């Protein structure tokens, strides 16, 4: 089984390195095929590992020693257990689909080879993140996915906005990663090891306040990666990257790393329910907050990005309330239908020559039947309609909130479920139905390549059926994760009905409101519309409160401190030496007689000093 | 009047001063050698006198060393001087400035 573990882990790296060989050459289709093929190999290995793990075994290997100095010992160790194998499956399925899809999507792009090098490198980092058996390895993967995300958001680096968004994402994540590093340091300091098994068996012996701090700092890291408030602004801007990247990184895998961290570190969070409650509250807040921003946005990918944020909020509610397997379940289901939704959006974008405003589309279902069907399917799953995957996972989260008697959280999530359904179908209605407005703007949409649609179909199937395996899933992951005890059997059906009604209501409202195309302009005058379209003015707030003062501070440090103090000091030293040399070079006139005179002067000075010091010394000691 | 250590030291200092002035003022290379000899012998006198005064022979030993080294120095110096004189016909210090910086 170790062999399969290594294949699953290193096949993406091989694909990445292979593609990297061609980065300086024109498009070579072989990079796409090789990278996709290796990803598929990785997927098959993960599937074999899954069947092995289902039998109740786990695989744990220590590949090599990484650091060993004094008491510090950190190996490159990998573990395939019930949690990581689920993540491996999600990552490899979605990335295989995205790789194959990208062959078509990036077909006319000059950076075709470079794209696959980055994309496979991302998958490799993600695999390290989920498979590592210690926090140090997790951190390596964590930084690796951050780096690849930077490279892929800024993939079209000639675009100013893309490089800006890439840097924003990178810097926001650095801020959060500092928190995470502090958490890891605290762990090492107090436990003396970073291995999961050691840490989780020792953590109960630590004082509670230290565990609380560890939990808080680790969660700060998770907040950055999973774009939770107040570090959420980068995710919407990250939509500057190519759409397959958004599907893979900013919907299905990387942004869920924060949820994975909380799930993985559940023995820590089990001890500190207060922090867990904070995580859940923040999650519920973000779910609603992001959902409202998605209501009015006029950028297709941003709508989906806000929806991702909102769903991550759901996952954190479940994880924070101790229902780790529910969080993981929603993570998995969400990965499938959200990636599908993004890839569909990619098709639409291609058809519309990179136009993203759904108001300028309309009636596309006539020309893009396949994409329309897939996107509606994904939206239904996202809205949480039976029997799609989203129904099972989202409903479980609401049930968790209700069962643990956090009715406010439940109410927030319940309303958000309606919002989710509404904005998903607003997008569908605007883009695919109604009058064909794109004709007024001179677009000639066309359906994507057939193989791209076929590549998307596995995700569509999974978005449909993933929820049906709930019981198998529970049996698998609860061998490692604690189960969650529901006290809601008596109201279960009522809850399901209420939630489903909310989702159906949202869908119905969207269909009725947008059946005749976009709403009138009058809406855009309203105060609440302006607040929402400007993302609650938070980016502006950050700009004014952090960016501008920081820029001013940097300017001061440059113009005033660096130029006038530091540079001036260095220049002064250099100038002094230079001038001294200039003025004293006359001494070296080559005349023996004058040299002798200088020698005598030196002698006299030395003797005078010797006498003076002797007198001074005697005077002090007398 | 008895001759004391002070007299020797005064003599030594006077000779040293004469030697220093010679080193500073003389432009003739030969005279420069004379001046250095005076400097060296001024120290020799001081060494011998102090050595006698404190009853330790090492000072006088030093004087012998200095005499020996001064002799070899003069031998080399005079050799160089003769070569220089044969080349240029002069032994004026101001002319020797090929090491000018």
Image (spheres, helix red, strand yellow):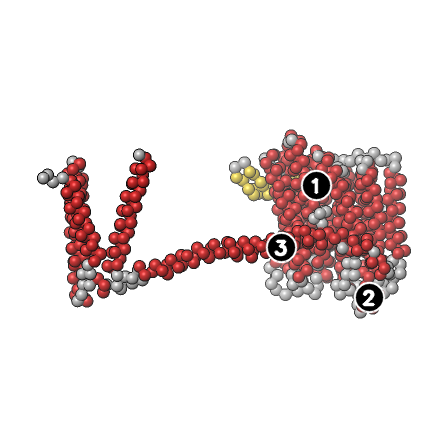
Q: Local crowd at mark 2 within 10 Å, few (<14), some, or many (≥20)?
A: many
Q: Secondary structure at mark 3?
A: helix
| Residue drawn at 75 percent across, 49 percent down | A309
**Residue A460 can be seen in this image:** no
Q: Counting residues from the N terminus, which is met first, the one under dot 3 or under dot 1?
A: 1
Asked where in the image residue A150 lies, by quadrant, the reply is: bottom right
Per the model, the C-alpha gap separating discs 3 and 1 is: 35 Å
Whether callout 3 and callout 1 share a subunit is answered: yes
Q: Nearer the viewer, mark 3 or mark 1?
A: 3
Relative vertical location of residue A622 with respect to residue A550 in this rendering, above or below: above
Question: Which residue has dot 2 on it?
Answer: A438
From the viewer's perspective, tell me whether residue A331 is left or right of residue A565.
Answer: right
Q: Secondary structure at mark 2?
A: helix
**Residue A188 can be seen in this image:** yes
In the picture, the disc for residue A551 is 3
Question: Residue B74: x, y in percent?
Answer: 16, 54
Question: Which residue has dot 1 on it?
Answer: A262
Tag 3 subunit: A
In front of the other: A338 or A56:
A338
Give the quarter of the figure containing the C terminus of chain B: bottom left
| Residue drawn at 70 percent across, 62 percent down | A106
């Amino acid at each position: 089984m170790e062999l399969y573990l290594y294949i699953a882990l290193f096949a993406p790296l091989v694909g990445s390195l292979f593609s990297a060989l061609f980065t300086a050459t024109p498009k070579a289709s072989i990079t796409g095929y090789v990278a996709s093929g290796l990803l598929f190999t990785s997927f098959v290995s993960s599937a074999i590992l899954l069947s092995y793990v289902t039998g109740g075994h786990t695989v744990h290997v220590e590949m090599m020693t990484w650091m060993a100095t004094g008491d510090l010992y950190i190996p490159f160790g990998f573990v395939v257990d019930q949690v990581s194998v689920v993540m491996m499956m999600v990552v490899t399925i979605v990335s295989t689909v995205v790789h194959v899809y990208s062959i078509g999507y990036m077909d006319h792009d000059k950076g075709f080879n470079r794209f696959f090098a980055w994309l496979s490198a991302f998958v490799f980092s993600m695999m390290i993140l989920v498979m590592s058996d210690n926090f140090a390895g997790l951190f390596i993967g964590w930084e690796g996915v951050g780096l690849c995300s930077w490279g892929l958001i800024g993939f079209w680096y000639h675009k100013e906005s893309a490089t800006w968004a890439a840097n924003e994402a990178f810097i926001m994540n650095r801020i959060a990663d500092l928190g995470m590093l502090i958490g890891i340091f605290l762990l090492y300091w107090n436990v003396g090891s970073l291995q999961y098994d050691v840490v989780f068996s020792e953590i109960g012996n630590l004082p509670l306040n230290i565990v609380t701090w560890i939990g808080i700092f680790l969660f700060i890291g998770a907040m950055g990666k999973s774009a939770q408030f107040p570090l959420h602004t980068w995710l919407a801007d990250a939509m500057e990257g190519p759409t397959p990247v958004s599907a893979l990184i900013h919907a299905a895998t990387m942004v869920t790393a924060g949820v994975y961290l909380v799930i993985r570190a559940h023995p820590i969070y089990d001890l500190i329910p207060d922090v867990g409650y904070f995580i859940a509250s923040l999650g519920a807040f973000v779910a609603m907050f992001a959902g409202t921003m998605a209501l009015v946005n006029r950028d297709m990918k941003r709508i989906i990005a806000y929806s991702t944020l909102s769903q991550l909020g759901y996952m954190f509610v479940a994880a924070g309330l101790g229902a780790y397997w529910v969080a993981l379940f929603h993570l998995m289901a969400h990965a499938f239908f959200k990636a599908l939704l993004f890839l569909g959006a990619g098709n639409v974008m291609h058809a519309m020559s990179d136009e993203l405003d759904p108001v300028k589309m309309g009636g596309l279902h006539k020309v893009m039947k396949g994409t329309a069907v897939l996107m509606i399917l994904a939206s239904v799953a996202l809205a949480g309609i039976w029997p799609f995957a989203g129904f099972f996972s989202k409903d479980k989260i609401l049930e968790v909130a209700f069962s643990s008697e956090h009715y406010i959280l439940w109410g927030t999530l319940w309303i958000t479920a309606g919002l989710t359904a509404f904005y998903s179908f607003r997008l569908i209605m605007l883009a695919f139905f109604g009058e064909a407005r794109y004709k007024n703007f001179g677009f000639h949409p066309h359906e994507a390549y057939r193989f791209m649609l076929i590549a998307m179909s596995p995700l569509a199937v999974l978005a449909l059926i993933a929820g049906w395996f709930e019981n198998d899933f529970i049996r698998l992951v609860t061998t490692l994760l604690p189960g969650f005890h529901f006290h809601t059997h008596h109201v279960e059906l009522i809850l399901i009905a209420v939630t489903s009604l909310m989702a159906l209501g949202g869908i119905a409202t969207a269909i009725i409101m947008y059946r005749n195309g976009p709403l009138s302009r009058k809406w855009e005058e309203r105060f609440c519309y302006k607040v929402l379209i400007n993302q609650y003015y938070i980016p502006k707030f950050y700009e004014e409160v952090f960016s501008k003062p920081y820029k001013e501070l940097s300017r001061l440090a440059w113009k005033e401190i660096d130029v006038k103090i530091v540079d001036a000091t260095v220049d002064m030293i250099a100038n002094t030496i230079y001038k001294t040399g200039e003025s004293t070079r006359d001494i070296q006139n080559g005349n023996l007689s004058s040299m002798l005179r200088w020698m005598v002067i030196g002698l006299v000075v030395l003797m005078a000093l010797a006498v003076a010091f002797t007198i001074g010394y005697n005077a002090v000691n007398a | 009047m008895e001759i004391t250590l002070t007299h020797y030291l005064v003599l030594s200092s006077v000779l040293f001063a004469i030697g220093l002035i010679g080193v500073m003022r003389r432009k003739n290379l030969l005279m420069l050698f004379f001046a250095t000899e005076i400097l060296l012998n001024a120290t020799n006198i001081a060494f011998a006198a102090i050595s006698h005064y404190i009853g330790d022979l090492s000072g006088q030993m030093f004087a012998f060393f200095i005499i020996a080294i001064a002799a070899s120095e003069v031998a080399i110096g005079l050799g160089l001087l003769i070569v220089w004189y044969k080349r240029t016909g002069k032994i004026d210090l101001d002319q020797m400035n090929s090491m000018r910086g």
